[in-house]
Amino acid sequence: MTAYDLAGKVFFITGGAGDIGRSITEGVLDKKSKVFFIDNNEEAGRKVLDELLSKYGGNNVDFFACDVTDRDNFEEAFQQAVDKFGHVDIMFNNAGIMCEAKPKRVVEINLLGSIYGSEIAAAHMTKDKGGKGGRIINMSSVAGIQDITAVPTYGATKQGIRSFTISCSMQPNIEDVGIEYAVLHPGNVSTGLNSNLEPGDLLFMDKLVAIKNNLEITTMTLERVVEAFLKLVTLEKMNGAMLEVTRDKICFVRLERQELGSIYPPP
């Protein structure tokens, strides 16, 4: 099967100053792609940009400070990318937070930010309106395919991202518009999101020690996530794919409805 060639492709990556965003940015730059990344932390974003410029050059990477919950700001950032590189081939909605004490903010950044990014990218890419087509990958989590008691709000956003993405992939005119949608479901990753858990991040703080110990046992490297992302984005046909990545496996998955009958709890 012929792989989708990343050489010369233009990526737009949200949350690019974070651990996963930066690692994937470097991963695709190493494949001769170009990257325009955004982050709401301008200081961190500028620092990452300076480091990337010294390694990859100014013609290949750029940064814009942006809050993905502000649609006007998001559209401005995307236009900056188009002005810089001429177009965008691949959108990666990666920005996210985990804080059960701030459910509104979690929903806005994780879910609404991914929806905004997908809509903005699709409007640019759609072939029936003069675009070149493209790919949209949304960052979910293992919490998007299984229920995790300690992070119900975070999990709700990640399941929402999965549902939104797969629903978009099933649109009847999807081949005509030339856009492919897919979703990535990482398990525990060695990032600040997991390693710096604080009161309010989890619903059941009395379980914090046990959860941290479990994270240490199951955590995978950033390189593992990059490996999975590259596997997903280089598929010859990507539309509708859901890729789970953990320390032990990289596996395409699909959720199926199960009927339990008319009695509850089921016998």
Image (spheres, rainbow, N blue to C red):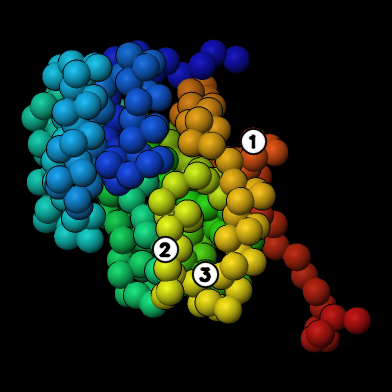
| Residue holding disc 2 | 98
Q: Residues within 10 Å of mark 1 (few under 14, many from 20)?
A: some
Q: Residue at x 29, y 30 (%)?
A: 11
Secondary structure of the residue carrying tag 3 is loop
Cα separation between marks 3 and 1: 23 Å
Which amino acid does the dot numbered 3 rest on? Val
**Position above or below: 251 against 28:** below
Residue 151: numbered disc: 3
Secondary structure of the residue carrying tag 2 is loop
Q: Residues within 10 Å of mark 2 (few under 14, many from 20)?
A: many
Residue 228 placement (x, y as % from top left): 54, 32
Mark 3 and mark 2 residues within 8 Å of each other at the beta carbon:
yes
Q: Nearer the viewer, residue 107 or 50?
A: 50
Secondary structure of the residue carrying tag 1 is strand
Residue 187 placement (x, y as % from top left): 58, 49
Which amino acid does the dot numbered 1 rest on? Ile
Q: Residue at x 33, y 50 (%)?
A: 95
Q: Quadrant of the C terminus?
A: bottom right
Q: Is residue 249 left or right of residue 27?
A: right
Q: Nearer the viewer, residue 32 or 246?
A: 246
**Which of marks 1 and 3 precedes in the sequence?**
3
| Residue holding disc 1 | 250
